[in-house]
Image (tube, rainbow, N blue to C red):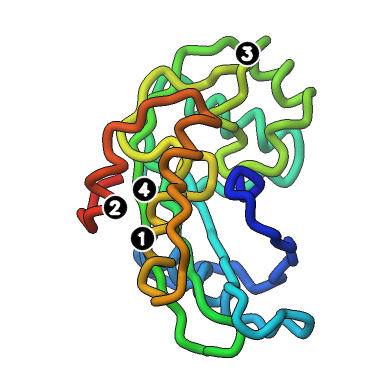
């Protein structure tokens, strides 16, 4: 998704402890992980550049569904999600390389899965696409096409709410507006009904 922006960027694993604290609210959890990843020291980062970090979780019946540990785990999660409604929460954090102050934001979307079959689950997991996804699915996968409907931010369900990112970056005085909402919609071939509200600072999506 960052390739859509036209920015030069490098992707670096943060390798932080992602253990959830006891009784930690999910929104606090994803924001803490995003902020912790963003605070990791980047030895080769150029002063003046931005450091972006994000974390996404799937919530079903109050339980977090993270990335699957193996194929059987992926199948189990997909079966539990089949035909049901759940929430996807993405936390994002941004800072300057030379500044420890971190800006954070969160985006929550509601997703309704379609009634896919066990054979479809098996084929999708066999494709490998499920293995690095929270909840074991990609909303944008055209073959599996797991989602029947959703409310919120399509890009956030993919893992990075681009409108939320841009409104954070606009808090930096020298940031050049990139129209991430337009780039997102063109690449997804999708009309987003909430991008104007998000850019206006409303807590939607």
Image quadrant in which the C terminus is located = top left
Q: Quadrant of residue 85?
A: top left
Q: Secondary structure at mark 1?
A: helix
N-terminal of the two: label 4 or label 2?
A: 4
N-terminal of the two: label 3 or label 1?
A: 3
Q: CA distance from mark 3 to mark 1?
A: 41 Å
| Residue 6 position within the rendered picture, expressed as x and y whole percent measured from the top left | 63, 50
* Label 2 environment density (alpha carbons within 10 Å; few <14, some 14–19, many ≥20): some
Residue at the image position 51 percent from the left and 50 percent from the top: 160
CB under 8 Å between discs 4 and 1: no
Disc 4 vs disc 1: which is toward the camera?
1
Residue at the image position 58 percent from the left and 73 percent from the top: 50
Residue hosting label 1: 167
* Label 4 environment density (alpha carbons within 10 Å; few <14, some 14–19, many ≥20): few
Closest to the observer: 117 or 138?
138
Closest to the observer: 94 or 40?
94
Image quadrant in which the N terminus is located = top right
Q: CA distance from mark 4 to mark 1?
A: 29 Å
CB under 8 Å between discs 4 and 2: no
Q: Please give the label number shown on residue 118.
A: 3
Q: Secondary structure at mark 4?
A: loop
* Label 3 environment density (alpha carbons within 10 Å; few <14, some 14–19, many ≥20): few
Q: Please give the label number shown on residue 62.
A: 4
* Figure check: 39 above or below 15: below
Q: Secondary structure at mark 2?
A: helix
CB under 8 Å between discs 2 and 1: yes
N-terminal of the two: label 2 or label 3?
A: 3
Q: CA distance from mark 4 to mark 3?
A: 24 Å
Disc 3 vs disc 1: which is toward the camera?
1
Closest to the observer: 62 or 50?
50
Q: CA distance from mark 4 to mark 2?
A: 29 Å
């Amino acid at each position: 998704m960052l390739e859509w922006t036209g920015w030069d960027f490098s992707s670096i694993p943060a390798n932080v402890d992602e253990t959830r604290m006891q009784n930690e609210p999910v929104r606090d959890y994803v924001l803490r992980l995003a902020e912790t990843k963003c605070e990791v020291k980047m030895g080769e980062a150029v002063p003046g550049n931005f450091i972006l970090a994000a974390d996404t979780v799937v919530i079903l019946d109050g339980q977090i569904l993270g990335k699957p540990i193996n194929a059987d785990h992926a199948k189990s999660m997909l079966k539990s999600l089949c035909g049901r409604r759940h929430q996807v929460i993405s936390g994002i954090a941004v800072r300057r390389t030379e500044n420890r102050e971190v800006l954070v934001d969160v985006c929550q979307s509601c997703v309704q899965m379609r009634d896919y079959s066990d054979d479809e689950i098996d084929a999708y997991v066999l494709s490998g696409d499920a293995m690095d996804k929270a909840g074991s699915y990609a909303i944008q996968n055209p073959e599996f096409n797991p989602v029947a409907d959703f409310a919120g931010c399509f890009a956030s369900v993919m893992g990075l709410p681009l409108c939320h990112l841009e409104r954070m970056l606009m808090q930096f005085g020298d940031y050049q507006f990139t129209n991430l909402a337009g780039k997102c919609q063109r690449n997804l071939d999708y009309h987003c009904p909430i991008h104007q509200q998000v850019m206006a600072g409303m807590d939607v999506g």
